[in-house]
Image (spheres, rainbow, N blue to C red):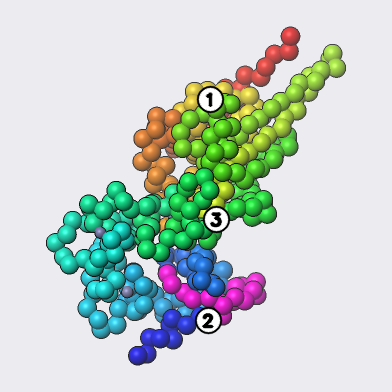
Amino acid sequence: MTFVCFLNAKVWTTVDGKKQEGILFEVNGDQIGLRINGREYHFLAYRFIPADREFIRQWSKIPRCHGCSKPIGNQSLKEAGDYRFHESCFRCLVCAKVFQGGEKLKRDEWGGMVHVDHFDRAKMCDTCSKIISSETISSKQVFKDGRIVCLSCASDGVFDPKRMEEVRKRVWPTLAALGITVPTGDVVIRVVGKDVIDKQALKINARGNLRGLTLTTYKIVSDGKRAKTSFSHEIFILYGMPHIECASVLAHEYAHVWLNERFIEDTAPVVEGFCNLVSEATLVQEKGKLASIIRENMKQNNSPVYGMGYRRMKQRLAILGWPSLLAEMKLKSKPPKLR
Ligand SMILES: [Zn+2]
Ligand SMILES: [Zn+2]
Ligand SMILES: [Zn+2]
Ligand SMILES: [Zn+2]
């Protein structure tokens, strides 16, 4: 067999000179998947030197099995949508039985399949809605707060303040380009579980499947002539979300901070719709599949607040553009009056 060399690890070199051994297992547009020490990571292909990018091009020319990422070779294959499988890899992710043909199947966006009758037993990734094989699920995919994620989302998860800081740095250029200015008040970002978010949400009467939350407090000090307002913000963000999703949630919360520092008030659909627009702006920049799936979920969301609000604000943005939309939002400012 000649294809074995493609399965071996090779040394990958980034354009800024970092080296890392890894096995290529997936190419999705501009995004590639590398298995490094048994964990799956996703990178943008342009981060690698030209020789590595050529390797990626050659790799993706060869028809591969979506189940095991090995070349199809001259074995007989099964096709489902854009995906090809070895006959023996064309299996239900719940019962692991090979499909014979003629069964009713249900498919996720990622080429994962189950028998229709087994769908209610399938576990889905909390982030990307990938069906997770019950055979291979590992403890690091099950979070303490009950969420379950797929292997690639888990391996890219943001769990600690240090990685959150990288996310924050990635988000700000996008926000600045929209015209969202840096907060005047202090912002503390807390990376927490769903239980903590839900508990904090009760304080401000927020509802729904929240992935982030912002609490703003302010103080008005007057010396008799002039009043000065100071703010402080606490942003709660769910731990374990992949970098891209984490960035989109953080952008949403910074939009709340921007609104709060201006005392901008409106109905929940307008406020959350606006914040989702800001969130979406970070996703537009990403070319990977995960970003487009999160955007699609936002578009299809049937919540009257997050979904309809977003769609209505999206139309408003199309008419006004960002500078005028921000100006329109500022008109809704209702600063508290000192007695
Ligand atoms: Zn296979
Ligand atoms: Zn099955
Ligand atoms: Zn996932
Ligand atoms: Zn919100």
Q: Is mark 2 within 8 Å of ligand 1?
A: no
Cβ of disc 1 within 8 Å of ligand 4?
A: no
Q: Is residue 98 left or right of residue 328?
A: left
Residue 159 among magenta residues: no
Residue at image x 56%, y 77%?
21
Q: Is residue 86 above or below residue 140?
A: below
Quarter where residue 2 is shown: bottom left
Mark number for residue 236? none
Residue 289 in picture, x, y percent from top left: 42, 57
Foreground pick, 63 / 58: 63
Category of crowding for the residue at label 1, using alpha-carbon neighbours closer than 10 angstroms: few (below 14), some (14–19), many (at least 20):
few
Q: Are marks 2 and 3 in contact (CB under 8 Å)?
A: no
Residue 289 located left or right of residue 235: left
Rendered-image quadrant of the C terminus? top right
Amino acid type assigned to the residue bearing label 1 in the image: Asn
Percent x, y of residue 20:
59, 75
Q: Which mark is residue 157?
A: 3
Q: Amino acid at mark 3?
A: Gly
Tag 2: Cα neighbours inside 10 Å, few (<14), some, or many (≥20)? some
Q: Which residues are magenta?
A: 11-26
Q: Earlier in the sequence, mark 1 or mark 2?
A: 2
Q: Residue at x 66, y 39 (%)?
A: 181
The chief SS type of the magenta part is strand
